[in-house]
Image (spheres, rainbow, N blue to C red):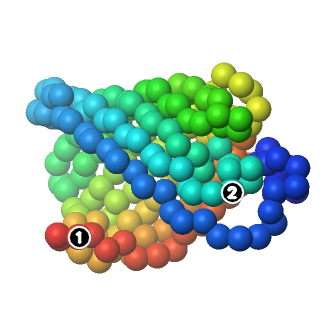
Amino acid sequence: ATLSARKAEEGAPLSGHQFGDIYFSIAANVLMERASVPGITLRAACKTASGEGGSARRYDDAPGYFIDASIFKTFRPGNGHSVSLAASTGFLCWQTKADRQNDAVMYGISLGYEYNSIISLSSEFSGYCGWRHDGDSPSVLKIKILAIPDKIVSPLLEYDHGFRDWPFDLLRLGIRVQAGG
């Protein structure tokens, strides 16, 4: 059932291992956020393939690249409260079977709330829409709670709910370790 859902070739191996992907990316602040001006960031990234086993790969386990832009603004009404809004859009391209490619429009919107660096709540809806309509248009809603977000070590709880071509639910309970404090 998994191989069918991933649109893998018939006879693809049922077990094995793969080495991880390598991502190269750069982000550039086009406009720094100020009191009355939102921030704008441009980002570009490339991703290598997962090695062998292309016949069993999912859409994401292939070489590709993306370019996107984000606009964001944080509001601080006082008393330790802050609310942040962000939206992004971009272009995603990745290799599919038979050395063909698929292209997609990426999108995302997020809303965040923080109180006195004690707790951070965030929600995000994001995904992409490919042109082949063969399972290439997943979207996901993510909700995250992070305690003491400004500390090096912070407990977190995250729930992801997938829509359309990503019909999964994911619950994460963990600890985030932030390099450099």
Q: Quick one: label 2, few (<14), some, or many (20+) residues within 10 Å?
A: some
Q: Residues within 10 Å of mark 1 (few under 14, many from 20)?
A: few
Residue picked out by circle 2: 53
Tell me if 82 is positioned left or right of 58 in this view: left
Say whether disc 1 or disc 2 marks the residue closer to the N-terminus.
2
Q: In which quarter of the image is the C terminus?
A: bottom left
The image shows residue 89, relative to residue 1, as above or below, that is: above
Q: Report the disc number at residue 113.
A: none
> What residue is rendered at 38% in x and 66% in y?
146
Q: Dividing the picture into quarters, in which one does residue 147 lie?
A: bottom left
Please state, as top left, top right, bottom left or bottom right, where the N terminus lies in the image. bottom right
Q: Can residue 164 be seen in this view?
A: no
Secondary structure type for disc 1: loop
User: Percent x, y for residue 127?
Assistant: 56, 37
Q: Residue 172 location, x and y as percent?
A: 54, 69
| Amino acid on which the number 2 mark rests in the picture | Gly
Q: Is residue 179 above or below residue 56?
A: below
- Residue under numbered circle 1: 179
Q: Can residue 133 be seen in this view?
A: yes
**Residue 52 spot, x, y in % from top left:** 63, 57
Residue sitting at x 19%, y 44%: 76
Query: Which x, y percent locates residue 166?
Result: 69, 46
Instruction: Name the residue located 71 percent from the left edge and 25 percent from the top edge.
Output: 132
Q: Nearer the viewer, residue 96 or 84?
A: 96
Residue 113 position (above or below residue 26):
below
Distance CA(mark 1)–CA(mark 2):
34 Å
Mark 2: which secondary structure? loop
Q: Quarter-wise, where is residue 149 in the image?
A: bottom left
- Residue sitting nearer the eye, 51 or 164: 51
On screen, residue 52 versus residue 93, left or right, reads: right
Q: State the residue at coordinates (56%, 36%).
A: 94
Residue 178 higher or lower than 6, as above or below: below
